[in-house]
Image (cartoon, grey):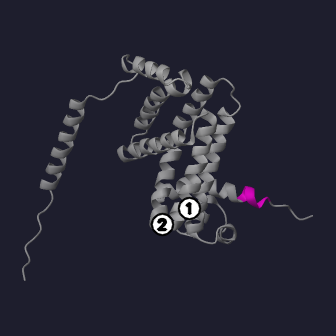
């Protein structure tokens, strides 16, 4: 009796195995043969599921969104206590830091290899998938959920640019501290939410960077850049 192959499961497994490979190597630096070798299948089998490298990249974005949202639903969806549900969401958010950083690298490759219409379609699916989950789980408007989604993207980019995952976790904690008065403590009263937020601002729970410290840091970065430029070899004059 011939073996029954679950093609969808096989496709998902292959995507999972090459997810970090794409982010680590970069789209332009790998071939279908490289992908096949990385995940341990023949090139023919890989080609059967994914006719092109671009197709793999495209499906990776959708796979990543579905996998991650399913994890949120699995961990927090059945939690009835709202405080505990928010705690679980924050936990998964912090646990997924490297996962999100890799998605951002995939997104950068997506912009390089696809036309803007294709990119827009992929992003629309990806963003709406997350926004719907945030809206439903936190019982907030889609517009508010969209703002949170965009803020998290900024946190991911910041940690990627600084090459510091601890910075990502720190900013997630800060975001959680800011949002809890509105979402958990006083979701139906702007006045109570404002009071709760003021309590946090006036306590040690939220430490905001001082303007002077930020200016000093920017000044130092500028000086370092000037020093680096000064160490570059000067252009040689044209001998002709």
Where residue 52 appears, x then y in whole percent? 59, 71
Q: Nearer the viewer, residue 167 or 195?
A: 195
- Residue at 60% x, 33% y is 138
Q: Quadrant of residue 17?
A: bottom right
Q: Residues within 10 Å of mark 1 (few under 14, many from 20)?
A: few
Residue denoted by label 2: 116
Q: Quadrant of residue 96?
A: top right
Marked residue nearer the N-terminal end (2 or 1): 2
Kindly check if marks 2 and 1 are in contact, taking CB atoms under 8 A apart as contact.
no
Up/down of 236 relative to 147, above or below: below
Where residue 190 appears, x then y in whole percent? 49, 25
Q: Nearer the viewer, residue 104 or 86?
A: 86
In three-dimensional space, the C-alpha distance between marks 2 and 1, rounded to whole angstroms, equals 9 Å
- Residue at 63% x, 57% y is 15
Q: Which residues are magenta?
A: 6-10
- Residue at 45% x, 58% y is 108
- Secondary structure of the magenta portion, mostly? helix
Residue denoted by label 1: 121
Up/down of 240 relative to 8, above or below: below
Q: Is residue 30 visible?
A: no
Where residue 91 appears, x then y in whole percent? 56, 31
Q: Is residue 52 visible?
A: yes
């Amino acid at each position: 009796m011939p073996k029954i192959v679950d093609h969808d499961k096989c496709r998902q497994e292959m995507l999972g195995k090459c997810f970090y490979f794409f982010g680590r190597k970069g789209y332009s630096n790998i071939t279908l043969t490289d992908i096949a070798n990385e995940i341990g299948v023949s090139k023919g089998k890989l080609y059967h599921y994914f006719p092109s490298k671009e197709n793999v990249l495209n499906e990776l974005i959708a796979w990543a969104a579905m996998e991650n949202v399913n994890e949120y639903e699995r961990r927090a969806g059945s939690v009835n206590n709202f405080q505990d549900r928010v705690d679980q969401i924050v936990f998964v958010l912090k646990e997924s830091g490297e996962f999100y950083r890799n998605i951002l690298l995939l997104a950068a490759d997506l912009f390089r290899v696809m036309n803007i219409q294709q990119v827009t379609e992929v992003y629309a699916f990806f963003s709406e998938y997350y926004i719907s989950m945030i809206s439903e789980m936190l019982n907030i408007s889609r517009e508010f959920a969209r703002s949170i989604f965009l803020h998290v993207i900024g946190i991911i980019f910041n940690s990627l640019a600084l090459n510091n995952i601890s910075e990502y976790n720190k900013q997630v904690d800060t975001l959680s501290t800011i949002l809890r008065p509105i979402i958990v403590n006083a979701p139906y009263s702007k006045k109570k939410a404002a009071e709760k937020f003021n309590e946090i601002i006036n306590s040690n729970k939220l430490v905001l960077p001082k303007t002077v410290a930020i200016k000093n840091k920017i000044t130092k970065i500028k000086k370092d850049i000037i020093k680096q430029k000064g160490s570059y070899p000067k252009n040689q004059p044209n001998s002709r």
